[in-house]
Amino acid sequence: MNNVILNVDTGVDDAYAIILLEKHGIRPDFIVASSGNSHIENAITNTAGVVKILNSSVPVYKGSSKPLVRDAYYEDYHGKNGMAGYNFNYAIDECENGILKMYEALKRKKYTIINTCPLTSIALLLLMDENIEKNINEIIIMGGAFHSNSYGNGNVGNAEFNIYYDPEAAKTVFNSNIKEYIMPLDVTMNPDFSVKNDDLKKMKDTGVIGDFMHKTLKYMVERYNSFEMHDPIATMAYFNKNAFKYINGDISVDSNGVTTLNENKNSNKYVACSMDKSEYIKSIYGKFFN
Ligand code: RIB
Ligand code: CA
């Protein structure tokens, strides 16, 4: 057991993050599927579908279905069903409450949480019990845009989607005393770390995983010319933290979801500002492509 919990809004890059962890022999104790990229039903079906094609027995539980106080905001960035139209022909009938499952699990032992979606489910967990954060080793968060370089400028206005979707939840999590590693667009939007059309013919996976990867990636690169591996880069920070350079500081979030970093050497928040390309090739690209 790795003492890892995933919180995802499975979309295409979330799916690749789950597959990447499996390729590194890292299996979460369970996965919480929350709304964000798509409606909660799609997030659950897509997450369960990825677990199924991996022949994994990892449980999938239901996370938050809307932001803490705002209306849900959806784009069809990942296609109508949130998975580039890919149909797993598989669905789980009932799905237990993932926020309660996280709470119960954390009462038993300490976990690292890898969060590749809006932070609503994590905020609800922290709001349940002010002491539960003591049992969280660290949270690794794909999110934010800190304008630390030419890549960190936001993908929903000046905000990054996961924060934009629920700024109040993000504030709650960033204001906690939990050690957090934030993997923002400043790193993930670097074109050195995205997948392009030419990569399709270099894919390693065959069988059902190869079929899934090829069809979903083909949809995304044809629609957007390239596809950023936001969430796999966040999961890489779990097993290869030294591949990144960080700025240590306190994070503020405005009502539009725009994030700002105020440098503070005593903070336990670490915002990644760059990634070593050879480490990316070794940890991510080389796992999916020849
Ligand atoms: O802004 C990119 C993030 O928003 C990724 O996690 C993507 O899956 C969406 O959730
Ligand atoms: Ca995501």
Image (cartoon, rainbow, N blue to C red):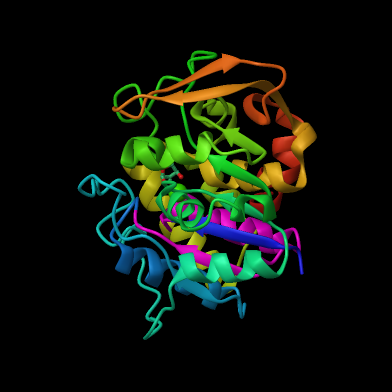
Q: Nearer the viewer, residue 197 or 234?
A: 234
- Extreme residue toward the left, this view: 71
Quadrant, the N terminus:
bottom right
Q: Residue furthest right?
A: 242
Which segment did they paint magenta?
A: 9-35
Res 224 visible: no
Q: Seen in the image, is 229 located left or right of residue 156?
A: right
Q: In the depicted view, which residue is nearer to us: 87 or 245?
A: 245
Name the residue located 41 percent from the left edge and 55 percent from the top edge.
Answer: 11
* Residue projecting furthest to the front: 130
Residue displayed at 30% across by 28% down: 255
Is 152 in front, or is 66?
Answer: 66
- Image-based side of 69 in relation to 128, left or right: left
Q: Examine the rendering and report whether any part of residue 9 can be seen.
A: yes
Residue 170 or 221: which is nearer the viewer?
170
- The answer to whether 87 is drawn above or below residue 4 in the figure is below
Where residue 122 appears, x then y in whole percent?
Answer: 49, 52
